[in-house]
Amino acid sequence: MNETSPAKATQSSELTEAEIAVHWKEEEYFQPGPAFIGQANLTDPKVRERFSLENFPECFRAYGDLLSWDHYWSQTLDSSNPPFYVWFKGGKLNACYNCVDRHLEKHRNKAALIFVGEPEEEAPQVITYQELFVRVNETAAMLQEFAGLKTGDRVRVDLRKRTVDVLLEERELAARRAALEAAGGYRSPPSQTPWQQIQRAMVSQLGDGMILNGAEKYQRVE
């Protein structure tokens, strides 16, 4: 009786790359059930026709119309200067309003964010549209009032460090400091909430004395 060595048995059980590649062409389709089909967002059977090359780029007006615009666009796609294509040319919108505010009327108590952190045993954090609306407005008011943020300023948000930086050139920074001093400097409100104290700690430029040198002078609320 011939015995096969363990090495030969292992070698014979291994598939070659060519043998594995044969199975790549195998396909099996699983049709969705009625319940799954009923909850689908895309139900138009003519969607491929509507978004065909013959209808490009005007077919994408459908996506633009899903948003709320302050000023409606004049051209769906400006391709006159490739590769710098401009979608919805001439249009103006508020991204924050589209992401948060406009959902309040019907979905204020619906989850806007569900954050699952690490470790996994920690409970997920659920923030509704109403709660997100309040937080966004608190942060915006803090940036405008305490950080001197103006329209057109660039802001860097570091979610990992939980910091917000207003990016300004040295000349602009010096001009704002001078204007602040000319106006009598930073005036502390008569009282501060614990939230305002936390927000000041989160804004690293305020902590470093960016514009409001007196921002760290606040009254504690017990």
Image: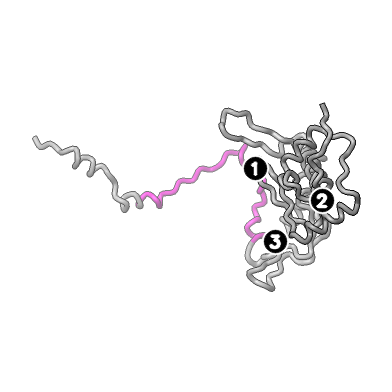
Give the mark toward the camera: 1 or 3: 1
Report the side of 213 relative to 121 (left or right): right
Report the side of 102 relative to 204 (left or right): right
Q: Marks 2 and 3: CB-CB under 8 Å?
A: no
Q: Of helix, strand and loop, which one carries label 1?
A: loop
Closer-to-camera residue (14/152): 152
Across and down, in percent, residue 194 comes to: 79, 32
Across and down, in percent, residue 55 comes to: 67, 65
Report the side of 30 relative to 12 (left or right): right
- What residue would you read off at disc 3? 59
Numbered range of the magenta stretch: 22-51
Across and down, in percent, residue 75 comes to: 76, 66
Q: Which residue is found at the position 40% from the left and 52% from the top?
A: 25
> On the rendered image, what quadrant is the N terminus found in?
top left
For the view shown, which residue lies furthest in the bottom direction? Answer: 80
Counting residues from the start of the chain, the first of labels 2 and 3 encountered is: 3
Q: Which residue is found at the position 73% from the left and 60% from the top?
A: 61
Give the mark toward the camera: 2 or 3: 2
- What residue would you read off at disc 2? 148
Across and down, in percent, residue 100 comes to: 77, 44
**What distance separates the C-alpha of mark 1 from that of mark 3?**
41 Å
- What residue would you read off at disc 1? 161
Q: Which residue is found at the position 80% from the left and 41% from the top?
A: 138
Closer-to-camera residue (129/192): 192
For label 3, the crowd category at 10 Å Cα-Cα, with few meaning under 14, some 14 to 19 and many 20 or more, is: some
Q: Of helix, strand and loop, which one carries label 3?
A: helix
> On the rendered image, what quadrant is the C terminus found in?
top right
Q: Which mark is residue 83?
A: none
| Three-letter amino acid code of the residue under disc 2 | Gly
Residue 204 lies in what quarter of the image? Answer: top right
